[in-house]
Image (cartoon, grey):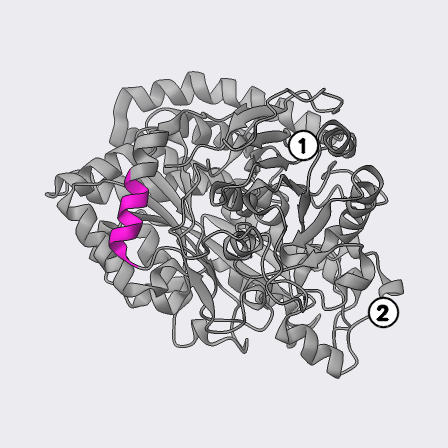
Amino acid sequence: MSTACLEIATARPVASPRHPSGSRTRILLSSVFGPYAQDDDYGSRVMNPMELYHNQVTRTQGPFSLRMFHRSWGLMLIQANIQAPCTVLDFPTLDRFVQELRRHTYDVVGISSIVSNQLKVRKMCELVRRYQPHAQIVVGGHIANMPDLDERIDADYIVKGDGVRWMRQFLGEDAEQPIRHPLIVSGHGCRSAGVDLSSHPEEIAATLIPSVGCPLGCNFCSTSAMFGGKGRFVDFYHTGDELFEVMCQLEQSMGVRSFFAMDENFLFHRRRALRLLELMQQHHKAWSLYVFSSANVLRSYTLEQLVGLGISWVWMGLEGENSRYPKLQGTDTVALVRQLQSHGIRILGSTIIGLEHHTPENIDDVIARAVRHDTDFHQFMLYTPLPGTPLHAELTEQGLIKNEDEYHVGDIHGQLIMNYRHPHLSDAQTAEYMVRAFDADFAANGPSTMRIARTTLAGWKRYKDHPDPRIRRRFRWEGRELGTALTALVSASRRYFAHNPALRAKTSSLLAELYREFGWKARLYASLGGRWLLSRIRREEKSLAAGWTYEPPTFYERNAAVTDNSAPLCLCTNPAEVLAGAATP
């Protein structure tokens, strides 16, 4: 999974295409139109919202689910790295997209999408041809992995790979110039337990994109396929020195102290990571890093190195026993998770449901093993052979890929049904097993936000008095809300699960630990804040039961090269449209 893969890259078999207007080319880059959490004819689905966590991680945690939106980071990266006048329209409604085409003239319209949204892309291409027939259309993102996409949509270029390089070459600009990193807030509209979470700069992370692609190259990975397959990736910042400089710029410009590293296996680049550690030590940087990593790569570092690097959150694959993927071989992942959590490192485990060896007879064991990890968050995804991946090619050769008249493309999003004939599982079974997995994790381990409090407390207790002031400063900052807001959350959870003996015992134990650590202040927040928060949780629960959904605002950003500064007429149905500049460090 990667939401930050570059959205536009190498094209159809055309030798180095160039636009005749060069750096004067007027460009519109857009994500697909909404709504995103409603069933419609274009492939939107209520159960496939534009929310990574609520969609795939905290799906059945109800009012406790973590809600937030992530921007189309690849589009932002391209805009920041070309000289041509470029507008980004992110999360538009269909009316808002049409309005932009009618209001402004563009030479190039770029559209980013995943495979399940291909009907939206087709509609957008039709609208560009209608309103701006002279504009060239560039389509990219994971959808570009589809070998026959040019037969499904009317686009001039279908491209994948390094989008910045391709667009620079297309405009006749220097493709080798250094990458300028845009200022990207990792999440917008953060919400949980019925409360909007703080958007103060110190409270949020900056997105950091060091590399794209994945060196491990699992055969089901669409991201790996998009950047050339196993062992192929693109480093934007090759050295720890380059990365450190960018992080300092983001820190200064955005006021942040934590970074979400959108790199499929950040710690795999060992020399770069250890040099970054040296520089953080030399300059006394108490940063927090949220990273993706495979289990075996994690084990190659000492805990002292991980803590020194500020690794405080890790997204790690837990495909389970008997899978054919080597990144977990020889690793006791349950023990590894426990060890990392005891040092305050929060874990988001990811488990695939529907691997070749999964059957109705063993699926409960598969789910139980995943749940036993008791990770802070747990993602469950269906084994899905997306077009362009080696797995899709393998199953196509075996005649197992379904005909497209057997399903709607909007339903192939990893949470409902498969696009191939599984040897043991039906569509009805996979849909039920997915819900069973999320429910089992929630029932056994409780709300993910409460688990975060538990792991954060473990790190606080271990490192709050560490002799290195840099380490001490980071853990005190990460634990700043333990005796206040997080205590209120645990207290509200205890009340919420009053009739669930197992979860009531779990929350009671954690609350007692918070009392011992933070005394009267924690007791006050538990009493007053816990009651107030419970009322918000109950209100959120009622809203969800009534069908409330969450849609992102529309973002509209123009770079400095755009000379037409007239504001667009707001025909969009979403009044929260944001006008902002694409500032870069």
Name the one closer to the observer, 583 or 392.
Answer: 583
| CB atoms of marks 2 and 1 within 8 Å | no
In the figure, is residue 263 to the left or right of 469? right
* Position of residue 126 measured from the top left corner of the image (x, y, whole percent): 83, 46
User: Which residue is identified by label 1?
Assistant: 551
Mark 1: few, some, or many residues within 10 Å (few <14, many ≥20)? some
Amino acid found under the numbered disc labelled 2: Asn
* Residue 413: quarter of image: bottom right
C-alpha separation, residue under disc 2 versus residue under disc 1: 32 Å
> Relative to residue 68, is residue 216 drawn left or right?
left
Q: Where, quadrant-wise, is the C terminus in this rendering?
A: top left
How many numbered marks have been drawn onto this rendered protein structure? 2
Identify the residue position indicated by label 2 in the image.
Answer: 403
Q: Is residue 281 left or right of residue 529?
A: left
Q: Amino acid at mark 1?
A: Glu
Q: Give the percent coordinates (x, y) of residue 146.
A: 71, 65
Q: Residue at x 29, y 64 (%)?
A: 270
Q: Secondary structure at mark 2?
A: loop
Query: Which residues are drawn in magenta?
Result: 239-248
The percent coordinates of residue 491 (x first, y second) are 44, 28
- Whether residue 176 can be seen here: yes
Nearest to the observer: residue 578 or residue 509: 578
